[in-house]
Structures are given as structure tokens and as C-alpha cells.
Image (cartoon, rainbow, N blue to C red):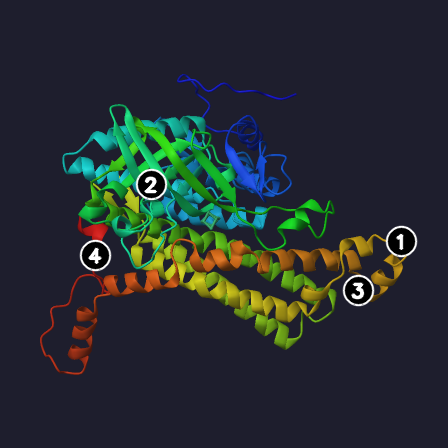
Amino acid sequence: MKIRFKLTSQTRFMLRTGEQYVEGIRERRHAKIYVMGKRVTDVTTNLFLKPSVLAFKATFDAAFQEDTRDLARAFSPFINEEVNRFVHIHQGPQDLVAKVKLLRRLSHKTGTCFQRCVGWDALNTLYIVTGKMAERGDGVYRERFLKYLEHVQRRDLALAGAMTDVKGVRTLRPSEQPNPDAYVRVVEERGDGIVVSGAKANITGIAAVDEVVVLPTRAMTEQDAAYAVSFAVPLDTPGVVVVVGRQINDARRMEGGDIDGVPYMAHHEGLIIFNNVFVPWDRVFLYKDWRWTGPLVEIFASFHRQGYGGCKSGLGDVIIGAAYELARAIGVDNKPNVADKLAEMVFLNESMYSAGLAASWEGSKLLKEGGWWVNPMYANVTKHLVARFPYEISKLAHDIAGGIVGTAPSEFDLKNEEIKNLLEKYLQGVPEIPAEERLRLVRLLENVSVSVGFLIESVHGAGSPAAQKIMFNRLYDYEKAGEIAKALSRVKVTVKWPKAPEPRRPSESEKL
Ligand code: SF4
């Protein structure tokens, strides 16, 4: 029996089950979503998007499953109720740590990016930025945001975070672009709200969300004031169009098998177009005040870079596990060269995770009343490791597993009675492990280790590697490091040692 929920202002359920989430987006029939040239009315049954919906669903199910229940729930002081952690505002370093741990575990259950963290990071970012504005005397955005937060927490909504604009000519600022909509902007200001136009690219999970939270993609100048805008709208708002992007092996989902076609889960990215979309004022969290865009981008980017330490190390576990089992399948798991490669993979994987935990434990409060943020240096280190190590982990896994990762026959060959026996005989290594088991592990390894979620997203998600190097140069205090060197080399005899051992300068947001 289907359970139907009507959301009203009196709605009290704070934790939705995975089924309730799926039911919610199934009923959202008028959202304009396109996949491979066709309009999709029901993303929950569409073969291309269903694996992505299931990955999103896992974030809801986590609040009810024995092993993740404690990690996936948190107490919200904003509504005085327990909420799903994916809509929670961090109340201290322990919450930041729980985020990284939850993300690692969810990667084990999904084998992909489960997409819900971007909207979560957008909420925490807006909480801090609107809080800072309020501390400076402009409380209007704060008030609107807190109401929106309550709306999200009470309904346990699935949010996408949309930051990356399509950017047109990369050397030109938003207001200098030949296409004025190359960055999302306000095209009309009305008594009851604003009208926005433009598009955001590479938006994780966009077709499977209830609402999208839009953030500016870069620090703006006064000339770019119309582009300094943040808002939230439901995905089925008139004028919103979503075009889902393709990924490697995606057509396998339509083949109908249960081995080759990523039977676990997958994620998607898409383009969201705002075609003169009306946004009421109570959904606008930043407008024209371009000076806040720099800190906003910095805060959001660091939040998401920290999270990568959890989700990518979780995918690393999947790959290490598959490589180990494939080594066992051919009897080489105890060989020294394989053990050495496995140890190297563990080192790379745990390095990403450790950095994510350090970014969390070393977090600090940006607001008088809270506003917990990660340590930006370690969050950027985390992401920079993630931009490199997954490629190395994948290479080592392919090395251990052998060429079969790129040459294995189809599952339909294994099911064909004419050749089944032959394939079972020649795909088998050690007698205890049947050929089908080996093929399943090969497919898992192939689908996860060369996926967009483990490779391309690791490089470009939350900012490309160059963006982290800019942050390293901003945050590292070369003068202090120079003082240390001068003291030890006796170039300088008296040195005033700072309290903190790390040579670090405050970030833009920490200086506010
Ligand atoms: Fe979450 Fe990781 Fe996906 Fe980002 S890349 S949305 S942190 S699972």
C-alpha cells in the first residue's frame, strides 16, 4: 500500500524514510527534466535515473538502519527535534567528524556519490553567512534563512546545491560577458520577489531533489552586484529546466542484466537552467551585497572539500576490497608484490580520511552563537589529496586485478547455455571461487574505479586542484615559516614564537 503525505505548515515528521522520499519525488510530475533528449516525468522509475534515486534514498534509510542510525541523526536546536544529519547545522567538531564518518559508511552502501551533501553544505554555509550579516546589523537574510531551514528540517527535504555557473568566457567577469546570462543573475526586481535567469552546470543529483539552493560561484565586484544572489526554489518551479549529463557505462542500466549494469547505485550530474524564474523574497538569502560572495564561496568550498575525505575513502574501501577479493580469486593475495600494492592503497586511502578528520576536529566557530566551520587548511589538503589519490588507488587495483577488468565477457555470455560451461571453466581461478563471483567483482571494480564519482568528481568537484593551491598560498604563513628558519640558522637571534605551532594566516571568513 502506498502511503501519501500532504505537507502542511503543521507537518511534524522530521525524519523521512527512504520510501517516503521516493514517493515525494514520484509525485512531482511537472518538473522539467530531460535525459538523452527525452522528457522524464517520473525519475523514480526511469532506468537512467533510478540508480541515482536509490543512492539518494540511502541517505534517508541511514537514519533508520542499525549501523548508521546514530551517525545519521542529530538534534536540531532550531526545531527542537531529531533530524536527518543531511539537513543538520553543525553544533561542534563532533558533528563535523560525524559527517566524515557517515559519508565513508554511505559510500560502502552505495558504491557511488549519494549526492545529498552539496545541499547540506549550502545550508551550513548560508547559516554562517546570514549569521555574519546579522552580526553586522543586517538581520533580514538571517530571518528568512532560519524560516527556510525550519521548512527543510521539518520536511527532511532532499536538496541540491547549485554553485558552478556555466561561466561563458573564462577571462571575463560576470558583468563583462557577451552572454549576460553566463552567470545566474537577477533580471527583474519586483515588490514580491526577484526574477532570475542563467544556468548552473555540473549539479550533483539535480534531477532527484525536492529543492535546489543556489549560491554564487565566485567573489563578485560592485559591477557584478546583479550576480551576487543566493536563493532556493522547488525543482518544479515554472521556468526551471534540468538536462541530465551522460556518464561512462550509463547505457548498461537499460540492458536488464544484474551484473554488468551497475545493479548497485549510481549518481548523476546535470545542467539546471533558470529561464526567467520568479523567486519570492522569503527565498532570497543574498542579493546585491557582493562583499559577502568571497567569504560565502570560501566557506562552502571548505565544507565540501572536508566531506570528500569521508566519501572518497569509502569508495576507496570498495575498490581495495574488490582488488583483494580478485587477488584471492586467482590465488595471489599472499604474494609479496600484491601485499605491497594493497598496503600502498590503504596508505593512500587512510591519508584522505585522516585529513578529513583533521579538518573536522580542528574546526572553529565563526559566529558568536555557533556557526561551526572546518579548518580550511586541512579541508583544502583533504581535497587536494582526493584530486590525486583515487587515480593511484584505481591504477593499483587494476594492476592487481589484471587485464580482465578491461576485457571480461558480458554477463549475457555467462548466461548463454551454449557457452556457459566453457566460460565458467576458463574464467575460474582457485576452485573455491566460481566464475560468476569473479565476474561480479570485476564489474564492481570496473564500475566504481573508473566512475565519474571516484575520478572526475575527485578532481573537479568542490573546486579544481588549482583552487586548493591558491588557498594554500593564502593560508600558509610564509613569513612565520621564514622566522623559524632564521631562528634555527641563527640569522636572527630573538624570535617571538606565536602560540599556535602551525604557520597559518586567518582566512577571509575567519577575519570577518
Ligand atoms: Fe557527498 Fe561526496 Fe557526492 Fe560530494 S562527492 S555529494 S561529499 S558523496
Q: Amino acid at mark 3?
A: Leu
- At numbered mark 1, what does the secondary structure look like: helix, strand or loop? loop
Q: Nearer the viewer, mark 1 or mark 4?
A: 1
Mark 1 — residue?
417
Percent across and percent down for residue 217 are 32, 48
Q: Residues within 10 Å of mark 2 (few under 14, many from 20)?
A: many
- At numbered mark 3, what does the secondary structure look like: helix, strand or loop? helix
Question: Sequence-wise, which precedes: disc 2 or disc 3?
Answer: 2
Question: Sequence-wise, which precedes: disc 2 or disc 4?
Answer: 2
Percent across and percent down for residue 392 are 52, 68
Between 20 and 434, which is closer to the camera in this rendering? 20
Q: Amino acid at mark 2?
A: Asn
Q: Seen from this angle, which residue lies furthest front?
A: 178
Q: Residues within 10 Å of mark 1 (few under 14, many from 20)?
A: few
Mark 4 — residue?
506
Mark 2 — residue?
124
Q: Nearer the viewer, mark 1 or mark 3?
A: 1
Question: Sequence-wise, which precedes: disc 1 or disc 4?
Answer: 1
Q: Amino acid at mark 1?
A: Glu
Q: Label 2 to label 4, Cα distance in Å? A: 20 Å
Q: Amino acid at mark 4?
A: Pro
